[in-house]
Image (tube, grey):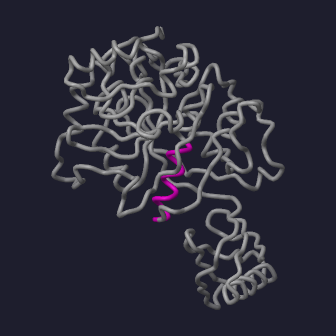
Amino acid sequence: MNNHIGLEEIRDALANQNHPWQAGMTSMSSLPPDEQQQRLGVKPPPGDPTVDEVAQRAEQLRGQIQALALERNARVTLPGAFDMRNLDGGNYITDIRDQGSCGSCVAFGCVATAEGRLRRQTGNPNLPIDLSEAYLFFVHGRARGRNCDNGWWPAEALQDFQNKGVVDEECDPYDLRKTDGSGVCADAASRLSTITGSTELTKDPAKIKDWLVNQGPVCACFVVYNDFFSYSSGVYKHVAGDQAGGHCVSIIGYNDNPGYWICKNSWGKGWGEQGFFNIAYGECGIDSWSNFGVNAVLYSGWRNNTQVQGLWAIDQQRNAWAYFASLGWKKISNETDAIFYTMLSDLIAAKAAGRPVNFFEQNNTIKQLYVF
C-alpha cells in the first residue's frame, strides 16, 4: 500500500515524538504515489521473506538491534562515530546519482558500495571511479528477468558483479531510454571490473561498523514508508504513513550519539541531505535485512589524461611500476619483452617531458598506453 500522506500530518507526528528528524518538500514528496513507488525496487526472490514479513520482523528486532549496535565490545576498538565522507580529511564516497523512475536501486546500492570499497582498498579518496549501474541492472539484471517494474535482489546482483563484471559509466551510461542493454560500448568485454566476493553482515551491527571502519561501505535494504519521501534532515524514524516497498542503499558511516547509520541514496541531490540520510539503528530493517560488504574490487578500464609522477624498476622478470597522480602505483604489463620495454620507455619520456598519458588498466596492471 502506498497512500499519499500530507506534510502537515508528518510534521504533527514528528512533533509528538520530539522531532527526531525534519520533513519538507523534496524531489520525492512532490511525486504522486505511483511514481514514488517506481523509485523503489527491492524484490525478494521466492522463498525469502516478503517486504511485509521483513517489516514485521524489523519491528520485533528493533530493540535488540539497537542494543547490539550501542554495545561496547572490549575485543574490538571502534570509534564512536565514523563517516567515509570525512576520513582523515578525504571523501571516499562517490557522487550522488539519480536512478529516476525505475526500480533499479539494487544496482545503485551495490555499485556505490563497490566504488567506495575501491577507494578504500587503494587508500585514495580522489581515485576517479564511476562504474555502470546500467550495465549491472539492464544487462545482468535483465538476463535474470528483472526490469524497472519488478526490481532486483542484492545477493543476485553481487553474484553477477563477481562472476560477470561491470563496465565503467562511460562505456554504458545510465539512460532510461535504453533499458534493453543497447547502450553498451563496443569494447565492453575488455572493460569489465569485478569484485572478488561479498561478505554478509546481516543482523550484526558490530560487524557492520567494523567493516565500515576497516573495509568500506555496506550495501543495505530497508522498508520504506510514505513519510520517508519527505525526509530532509535529521535521524529518520518511521512516524507516519503506510509501507511503500523495499529499497536498497549504501551505508557509509555511523554515529553512536544518538545512534544512527549514515547512508548514500540514489534519488538525486534534491532529496534528503544533498542525497544522503541518517537512519536510527534498528529502524525499518536497515541493519537486519540483506547487508553485504564487498571484499575487493578488480578494476578494468581506461585512465585518461594522467600525469606520471614516479617510476620504479628492477632487472628481474621485467618488474616495473609507474606512479600516477590520484591513481597511485600501477604495474607495467610484462607479457612480452616488446610491450614491456616500449611502455616503460614511453612512460620515462612522458615523465621527463611532463606529458599526460592515457592507459588501459586491468587489475592494477597497465595493458595499453598512449602518450600525448
98 horizontally vs 205: left or right: right
Residue 48 lies in the magenta stretch: no
Q: How many marks?
A: 0
265 horizontally vs 262: left or right: right
Magenta: main secondary structure equals helix
343 horizontally vs 160: left or right: right
**Residue 74 sits above or below residue 346 on the image:** above
Which residue range is magenta in the image?
A: 111-123
Q: Residue at 68% across / 90% down in the picture?
A: 352
Q: Picture quarter containing residue 287? A: top left
Q: Picture quarter containing residue 25? A: top left
Q: Residue at 34% across / 36% down in the picture?
A: 278
Q: Position of residue 9 (x, y in %)?
A: 33, 12
Quadrant of the snapshot with the C terminus: bottom right
Q: Where is residue 326 in the image (x, y as percent from the top left)?
A: 55, 69
Question: In the depicted view, which residue is nearer to us: 76 or 175?
Answer: 175
Q: Residue at 75% across / 83% down in the picture?
A: 346
Q: Where is residue 356 in the image (x, y as percent from the top left)?
A: 70, 76
**Residue 143 sits above or below residue 129 on the image:** above
Q: Picture quarter containing residue 97? A: top right
Identity of the residue furthest to the right in this view: 186
Q: Where is residue 298 in the image (x, y as percent from the top left)?
A: 60, 57
